[in-house]
């Protein structure tokens, strides 16, 4: 799967673990993670760009977008997100060619959260 290709973890290895526990490391911006969680807890959709790590310890940048999943009463019952690998993050490294916002992402690397 795209998830296994990017992160190195199988679905079974992820069961019962948070993405933070699996992917965060020394260069992961804890402030950005805290801000993302705060937005989610207030019911807002959230996103950020993080430095994370594969199972083998290789560092990679990713664009993370998360939103709440609500039940019929409007209560948050889960979260769903997309993790996309960032290839370039600024105009200089992209040769000035950035098509959507400030990120150029690898195609077909969208990854669903697993709870």
Image (cartoon, helix red, strand yellow):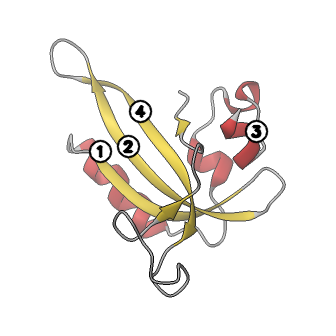
Q: Is residue 90 above or below residue 109?
A: below
Which element is circle 2 on?
strand
Marked residue nearer the N-terminal end (4 or 1): 1
Labelled pair 2, 4 in contact (Cβ < 8 Å): yes
List the residue tagged with mark 3. Answer: 9
Query: Dot 3, how many residues are within 10 Å of its Cα: few (below 14), some (14-19), or many (20+)?
Result: some
Marked residue nearer the N-terminal end (1 or 3): 3
Q: Position of residue 77 (x, y in %)?
A: 33, 22
Q: Is residue 84 above or below residue 94?
A: above
Labelled pair 2, 1 in contact (Cβ < 8 Å): yes
Q: CA distance from mark 3 to mark 2?
A: 20 Å
Which element is circle 4 on?
strand
Query: Dot 4, how many residues are within 10 Å of its Cα: few (below 14), some (14-19), or many (20+)?
Result: some
Marked residue nearer the N-terminal end (2 or 4): 2
List the residue tagged with mark 1. Answer: 40
Q: Position of residue 15 (x, y in %)?
A: 66, 26
Labelled pair 3, 4 in contact (Cβ < 8 Å): no
List the residue tagged with mark 4. Answer: 80
Q: Nearer the viewer, mark 4 or mark 1?
A: 4
Q: CA distance from mark 2 to mark 1?
A: 8 Å
Q: Residue furthest bottom?
A: 92
Query: Dot 2, how many residues are within 10 Å of its Cα: few (below 14), some (14-19), or many (20+)?
Result: many
Residue 75: image quadrant is: top left
Quadrant the N terminus occupies: top right
List the residue tagged with mark 2. Answer: 66
């Amino acid at each position: 799967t795209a998830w296994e290709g990017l992160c190195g973890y199988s679905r079974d290895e992820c069961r019962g673990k948070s993405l933070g526990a699996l992917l965060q490391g020394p260069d992961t911006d804890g402030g950005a993670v805290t801000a993302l969680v705060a937005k989610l807890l207030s019911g807002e959709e959230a996103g950020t760009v993080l430095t994370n790590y594969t199972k083998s310890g290789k560092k990679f940048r990713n664009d993370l977008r998360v939103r709440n999943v609500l039940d019929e009463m409007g209560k948050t019952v889960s979260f769903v997100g997309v993790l996309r690998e960032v290839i370039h993050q600024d105009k200089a490294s992209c040769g000035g060619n950035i098509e959507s916002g400030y990120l150029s992402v690898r195609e077909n690397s969208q990854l669903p959260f697993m709870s």
